[in-house]
Image (spheres, rainbow, N blue to C red):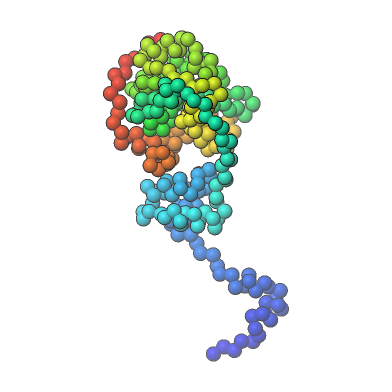
């Protein structure tokens, strides 16, 4: 039996060592589940607990409990930042056509512009197109400027490439979308344009929500060297958004997986005419 020479208190006092530091247990190395949580949280810094949990449940066996995700993130100071509280405004009554809600895939598409700048400070405009029912991001296309003729050409290219076509397409009242030639072309293709009321962005909420995610997760976090770099990153983010990122409105699965569970539209797509 070993005899204690002096008390722990006296030894720490003599060596000028804090007793709490002496007693502190060695930190355990994270196991595979905790390592997966840390890697996902660091790779997706704007995602919260629910989105990280949904993301890991399809990639980790056994499934990871959301309480464990919350504990690991809290212990490692990986909590995502709080969203700004939106100012609540009274909604103006809108005509029935503007309040139309999508009830099937490819019934209503929405499009809008998002603006950013490249490293040299020059403006870049991004055309964003999404499907309102499946929440898929169908297109992210960037250019220094965007005229209505370019919008028409981009829509035609998208419909020809994807072999999909909406019955309605919703937008704000920007001159690129209300141009007479573009409206006539849409009607020729069997697509009815829907316009929101001026100053009412909530009437185009699906694409506005997509724009917010795009800005928060990509545009606000990176500096783009040139337009090619911007377009490459936009396409990478679009694929990640559709194929990997869980979406709350799709049952916490990616939009592409959700769209694959839906019946495809039976529209006959012909080559668009200019």
Residue 105: x and y in percent read 34, 29
Image side of residue 82 versus residue 30, left or right? right
The front one of 173 and 68 is 173
- Quadrant of the rendering where the N terminus is positioned: bottom right
The residue depicted at 39 percent of the width and 36 percent of the height is: 255
Q: Total of numbered circles in the picture? A: 0
For image coordinates 35% across by 15% down, the residue present is 190
> Residue 17: which quarter of the image?
bottom right
**Residue 69 position within the rendered picture, expressed as x and y whole percent measured from the top left:** 47, 54
Residue 273 appears anywhere in the view: yes
The one of 97 and 270 positioned closer to us in this rendering: 97
Q: Nearer the viewer, residue 214 or 227?
A: 214
Rendered view: 109 above or below 248: above
Q: Is residue 26 above or below residue 95?
A: below
Q: Position of residue 195 (x, y in %)?
A: 47, 20
Identify which residue is drawn at 48% across, 32% down. Answer: 210
Q: Examine the rendering and report whether any part of residue 127 can be seen.
A: no
> Which part of the image, by quadrant, shows the C terminus?
top left
Q: Is residue 270 left or right of residue 232?
A: left
Position in image of residue 54 (x %, y %): 41, 47
Residue at 54 percent across and 21 percent down: it is 198
């Amino acid at each position: 039996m070993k005899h204690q020479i002096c008390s722990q208190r006296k030894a720490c006092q003599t060596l000028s060592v804090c007793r709490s530091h002496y007693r502190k247990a060695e930190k355990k190395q994270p196991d595979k589940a905790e390592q997966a949580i840390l890697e996902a949280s660091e790779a997706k810094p704007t995602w919260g607990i629910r989105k990280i949990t949904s993301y890991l449940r399809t990639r980790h066996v056994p499934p990871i409990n959301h309480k464990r995700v919350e504990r690991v993130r809290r212990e490692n100071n990986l909590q995502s930042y709080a969203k700004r509280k939106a100012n609540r405004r009274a909604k103006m009554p809108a005509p029935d056509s503007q309040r139309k809600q999508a009830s099937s895939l490819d019934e209503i598409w929405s499009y809008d512009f998002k603006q950013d700048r490249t490293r040299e400070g020059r403006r870049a405009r991004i055309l964003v197109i999404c499907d309102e029912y499946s929440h898929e991001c169908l297109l992210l296309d960037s250019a220094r400027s965007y005229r209505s003729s370019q919008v028409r050409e981009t829509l035609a290219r998208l419909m020809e490439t994807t072999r999909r076509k909406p019955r309605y397409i919703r937008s704000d009242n920007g001159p690129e979308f209300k141009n007479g030639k573009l409206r006539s072309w849409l009607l020729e293709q069997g697509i009815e344009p829907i316009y929101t009321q001026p100053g009412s962005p909530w009437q185009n909420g699906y694409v506005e929500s997509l724009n917010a995610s795009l800005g928060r997760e990509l545009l606000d976090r990176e500096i783009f060297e040139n337009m090619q770099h911007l377009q490459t990153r936009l396409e990478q983010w679009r694929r990640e958004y559709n194929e990997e990122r869980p979406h709350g409105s799709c049952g916490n699965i990616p939009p592409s997986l959700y769209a694959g569970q839906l019946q495809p539209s039976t529209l006959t797509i012909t080559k668009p005419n200019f």
